[in-house]
């Protein structure tokens, strides 16, 4: 297919992601109210897992079927970078001052745990490329990532339940009625809607992955873009579109906890995808999964941690100053993201 046809198809499928992502956000917000867990936890666990499924499908397919660990890793770390960059986009269209003022402490904890998970994935890659052999086998690193992810989810669940209980006590002390109006919907029907819209988002996301990969692999006059750049820019942008749509919808609904929970929750889940890719790669290939990943992907991993660090600083400092409709933190994220992507492009060619 020619680039024009691929671009039209990409925009059409992106429209499907937008529509289904909107309804998924509504259902996810209602689920949080019914389970009395709060939007942050639903965004972190439920929505982030659903919106990250395109990354899972694309990365596992690249690793096992295509035998391209480099492409899979580029997609994962590139998605983590772009997910943080989503905060810049949301801040630009939010018209009531810097967006960081709308978030509490929960995003700082989830972003910090995301940095821990990303660093663990980077260490696994680095240790496999230093010396003749890694002291820890590939399955050992995957097991460590799985244990870290389980601990992260447990910690975030306890934190959110504690904060939800404090908020309920405060409302009761003020004489407010601690009840949630959910209309005629039952928990079962809400779960069905979350599953249905989530499936539609995933299916559309897979279509985006295919179209973006075809468009990025097109033979331009200056040549191909390279696997690392295609994974970081082409696949990462396509598979992160569900996070962008859900985040924009949540901000428009003033459900800021859903938006930020989905962003940092997706970053945590994506590192779990790295372990799943290793498990899917090993039965079909004799080489080490982590050793086959190009070192340029470490630049993207460290870039993701740096971007998350700036986001944490902005959430804690909460400056009221802005420039070009961006807070100082989101402006810094924007500059670093663009510079980092250019560096990856130069190294990946």
Image (cartoon, rainbow, N blue to C red):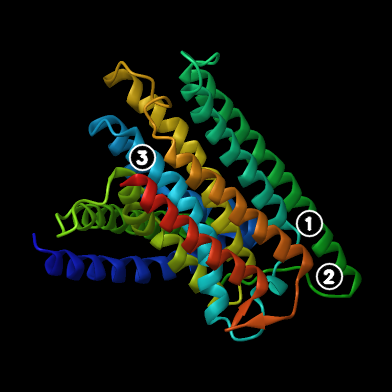
Q: Residue furthest left?
A: 1
Drawn side of residue 126 relative to residue 346, left or right: right
Q: Position of residue 181 (x, y in %)?
A: 63, 72
Drawn side of residue 35 relative to residue 176, left or right: left
Number of the front mark, 2 or 1: 1
246 shown above or below 127: below
Q: Which residue is mark 3?
A: 72
Q: SS at mark 1? A: helix
Note whether residue 290 is visible: yes
Q: Dot 2: few (<14), some (14–19), or many (≥20) neighbours within 10 Å?
A: few
Q: Which residue is mark 1?
A: 163
Asked whether the beta carbons under mark 3 and mark 2 sit within 8 Å of each other, the answer is no
Q: Which mark is first along the chain, 2 or 3?
A: 3
Q: Dot 3: few (<14), some (14–19), or many (≥20) neighbours within 10 Å?
A: many
Q: Position of residue 126 (x, y in %)?
A: 52, 29
Number of the front mark, 1 or 3: 3
Q: Residue furthest bottom?
A: 95
Q: SS at mark 3? A: helix
Task: From the viewer's side, name the closer residue of 152 and 295.
Answer: 295
**Structural distance between the alpha carbons of marks 3 and 2:** 47 Å
Q: Quadrant of residue 252?
A: bottom right
Q: Dot 1: few (<14), some (14–19), or many (≥20) neighbours within 10 Å?
A: some
Q: Which mark is first along the chain, 3 or 1?
A: 3
Q: Which residue is mark 2?
A: 171
Drawn side of residue 45 relative to residue 77, left or right: right
Quadrant where the N terminus sits is: bottom left
**Structural distance between the alpha carbons of marks 2 and 1:** 12 Å
């Amino acid at each position: 297919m020619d680039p024009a046809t691929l671009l039209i198809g990409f925009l059409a499928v992106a429209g499907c992601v937008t529509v289904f992502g909107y309804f998924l956000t509504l259902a996810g917000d209602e689920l949080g109210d019914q389970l009395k867990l709060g939007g942050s936890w639903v965004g972190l666990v439920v929505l982030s897992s659903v919106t990250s499924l395109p990354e899972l499908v694309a990365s596992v397919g690249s690793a096992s079927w295509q035998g391209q660990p480099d492409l899979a890793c580029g997609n994962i770390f590139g998605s983590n970078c772009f997910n943080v960059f989503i905060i810049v986009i949301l801040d630009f269209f939010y018209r009531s001052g810097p967006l960081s003022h709308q978030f509490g402490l929960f995003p700082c904890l989830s972003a910090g745990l995301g940095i821990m998970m990303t660093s663990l994935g980077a260490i696994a890659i680095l240790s496999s490329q230093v010396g003749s052999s890694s002291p820890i086998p590939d399955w050992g690193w995957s097991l460590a990532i799985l244990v870290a992810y389980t601990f992260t989810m447990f910690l975030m669940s306890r934190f959110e339940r504690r904060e939800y209980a404090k908020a309920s006590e405060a409302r009761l002390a003020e004489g407010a009625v601690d009840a949630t109006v959910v209309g005629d919907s039952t928990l079962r029907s809400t779960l069905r809607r979350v599953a249905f819209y989530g499936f539609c988002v995933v299916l559309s996301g897979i279509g985006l992955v295919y179209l973006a990969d075809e468009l990025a692999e097109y033979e331009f006059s200056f040549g191909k873009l390279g696997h690392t750049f295609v994974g970081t820019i082409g696949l990462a942008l396509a598979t992160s579109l569900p996070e962008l749509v859900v985040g924009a919808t949540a901000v428009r609904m003033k459900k800021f906890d859903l938006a930020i929970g989905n962003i940092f929750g997706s970053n945590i889940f994506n590192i779990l995808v790295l372990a799943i890719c290793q498990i899917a790669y090993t039965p079909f290939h004799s080489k080490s999964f982590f050793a086959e990943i190009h070192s340029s992907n470490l630049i993207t991993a460290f870039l993701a941690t740096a971007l998350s660090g700036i986001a944490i600083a902005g959430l804690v400092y909460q400056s009221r100053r802005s420039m070009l409709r961006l807070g100082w933190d989101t402006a810094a994220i924007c500059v670093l993201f663009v510079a980092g992507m250019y560096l990856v492009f130069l190294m990946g060619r």
